[in-house]
Image (cartoon, rainbow, N blue to C red):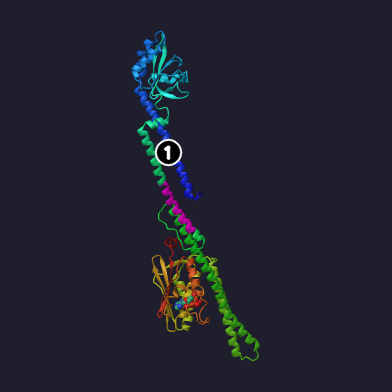
Amino acid sequence: MLNSFYAKLSALFLVLLVGLGIILATFGMRAARQYADEVEQKLNRTLAEEMVPRFEPHLKDSIDTESIEATIQSMTGINRRIEIYLLEGDGTLKASFAVPDAEIKQRQVDLAPVRRFMEGDELPILGDDPMSAQGKKPFSAAHIEIMGRKGCYLYVILGSEKYASVASMVGDSYILQTALWGLGVIILVTAGVGLLLFRRLTKRLRGIQAVVADFEQGNFDRRVEVTSRDEIGRLGECFNRMADNLTETMEELRQADRMRRELVANVSHDLRSPIASIQGYLETVSMKDGDLDPEKRQHYVETALKNTKRLNTLVSELFELSKLETKQIEPTIESFPIAELVQDVVMQYQPRAEEQAVDLQAELPERHARVEADIGLVERVLSNLIDNAIHYTPEGGRVRVRLNNERGEVCVEVEDTGPGIPEDDLPHIFERFYRVDKSRDRDKGGAGLGLAIAKTILELHDRTLEVESTVGKGTTFRFRLPVESEVERQAA
Ligand code: ADP
């Protein structure tokens, strides 16, 4: 508990507050005292001067202490406590009145304050109090003649006893007492409010700490409740963002791991069946070489060859995808007429389309734009999409490759009248090895890598591959490429 942030903060705050209170009280008392001195001195500024004519007759031949003390009594009354001294021209104490001689502690008075007083300097001016060793008091002073010696001083210490100690001064003053009480109450209230505020503040910190500790224990779903935009609120936000990123990364890692396992499983499966088939046919040919009629032999060898080609395609596609994903292939962006590329690829696939009785045609706009992309990679995307479209479209169906000029872009569409893709499968068709018809004879379809390759190529161009499909009606794949900028065209 004592080690907690709250305890440390509170202790520091209380120490500072009490310190501040003491300093304030000390300064306040000192100011009050100085004020009292100032008032006393101002009120009695001319006291000494007024006394001089009354004292001088008793100082002509000798110092007539009795008469002087009687004069003092008649002037000040009994209650008034003042001490009166006669000083020589050098400040030495010559005589004192209304003061027992035993109580005199200083017999030499510093004359500098006395001269300043008599020159009319700003009040208060404190002078030496002969009754205390170090004390300074307000006073009144005037020149006086003692036994024919001019240049002596009548030195009157004012209110000497009254404010001797702070305690007596406070005890006497209702205003000072009230002020001190007020200060005490203010300090108490501030301390209370401060401690409450600290408690609220540290409670929020404790809340964050609890969530972080929970996170550490594996509860990745808990988040800090952010209620304000101050530093603590922002700390909570930062933690929440960090937690989101961490969980996202963990999820991605988990997914990557799952995909890696699936990839290994799929690759082994897809490699195993053609290899087993090649092995089987070649063994048969090798064992029954003499007994086989040439036709059968030819069939076996051709099947083995077909499987070898399949293997070759699969391995090359895998290799290509892996290079694309690890960014070993960087697109070389150049500008080229997309319509010409589309026409070339469509022509390449024409024989296969005719073979499958599929009507394959390109629909091109009148104005042929030039796009900026890697021509080889875009050709690969087109081939994969057209290949799939012809592959999945039944006899008598239609495949259209369409170009549309849009603002700053050319939209490329490959549309077919094939069986379409069920809605549930649509989000997955771009995954590696994903096939809608899992039971499909693998001889017929590809390895399930064609769309993954097309999508990765477009991602390398910062583009997306979109798909729209209606089961029973057909499928449309669509992507957009940027047209060559005006500046470059003029430069070319
Ligand atoms: P494959 O090599 O199996 O064609 P792809 O990655 O090219 O692999 O496609 C993934 C899956 O998406 C295919 O197995 C197929 O089920 C579906 N598919 C792709 N293109 C079409 C299309 N034009 N019409 C219907 N289904 C398609």
- At a point 49% along the width and 58% down the height, the residue shown is 212
Q: Dot 1 corresponds to which residue?
A: 21
Element assignment for label 1: helix
Q: Is residue 397 visible?
A: yes
- At a point 59% along the width and 87% down the height, the residue shown is 298
Nearer to me, 117 or 366: 117
The location of residue 322, given as percent across then percent down, is: 55, 69
Residue 207 falls within the magenta-colored stretch: yes
Q: Is residue 380 above or below residue 180?
A: below
Nearer to me, 465 or 144: 144
Going by the image, does 301 lie left or right of 175? Answer: right
Disc 1 residue crowd, few under 14, some 14–19, many 20+, Cα 10 Å: some
Amino acid on which disc 1 is placed: Gly
The magenta segment is 193-212
Q: Quadrant of residue 313?
A: bottom right
Q: Is residue 137 above or below residue 446?
A: above
